[in-house]
Amino acid sequence: MSFQAYLDNIQTKTGKSPDDLRKLATEKGFLENGKLKPEIKAGQIVQWLKDDFQLGHGHAMAIYALFKGIKSAE
C-alpha cells in the first residue's frame, strides 16, 4: 500500500484529513509550529490515534511519519 493510500484510508475511517490531524495534534500539545516536539515519542501519537480514532498501528505510524516529516501528504 502506498503512503498516500494509507492517508486516504485514514481520512475515510476518521473523517479527518492530514491537516485536521495536525491541528488536533497541535491542540493536544504534540506539535508546535507545525513540527513534532522533540520529546514526543511515536508511542504517544500511536496511543492517541488508537484511543480517539480506533486506528491500527500501521495507520497511526503513517501519521507519526507525517508529523515527523519522514513522508509528506501530496
Image (cartoon, rainbow, N blue to C red):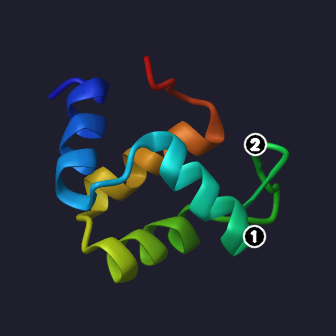
Image vertical order of residue 20 relative to residue 41, above or below: above
Cα distance, mark 1 to mark 2? 11 Å
Quarter placement of the N terminus: top left
Please state if 12 lies on the left or on the right of 59 as rendered.
left
Count of numbered badges drawn on the protein: 2
Question: Residue 57: which quarter of the image?
Answer: bottom left
Q: What's the residue type where badge 1 is placed?
A: Gly
Please state if 16 lies on the left or on the right of 6 as rendered.
right
Image vertical order of residue 13 relative to residue 43, above or below: above
Evaluate if marks 1 and 2 touch, with contact meaning CB atoms under 8 Å apart.
no
Q: Secondary structure at mark 1?
A: loop
Image vertical order of residue 18 relative to residue 64, above or below: above
Q: Which mark is residue 47?
A: none
Image vertical order of residue 51 relative to residue 17, above or below: below
Relative image position of residue 38 (x, y in whole percent)? 82, 55
Relative image position of residue 56 (x, y in whole percent)? 23, 64
In the rendered image, which residue does mark 1 sit on?
A: 29
Quarter placement of the C terminus: top left
Q: What's the residue type where badge 2 is placed?
A: Gly
Pointer 1 local density, CA inside 10 Å: few below 14, some 14–19, many at least 20: few
Pointer 2 local density, CA inside 10 Å: few below 14, some 14–19, many at least 20: some
Image point (50%, 54%), residue name: 21
Relative image position of residue 25 (x, y in whole percent)? 62, 62
Q: Secondary structure at mark 2?
A: loop
In the rendered image, which residue does mark 2 sit on?
A: 34
Image point (75%, 42%), residue name: 34
Looking at the image, the residue that sits furthest to the top is 74
Image point (75%, 70%), residue name: 29
Q: Earlier in the sequence, mark 1 or mark 2?
A: 1
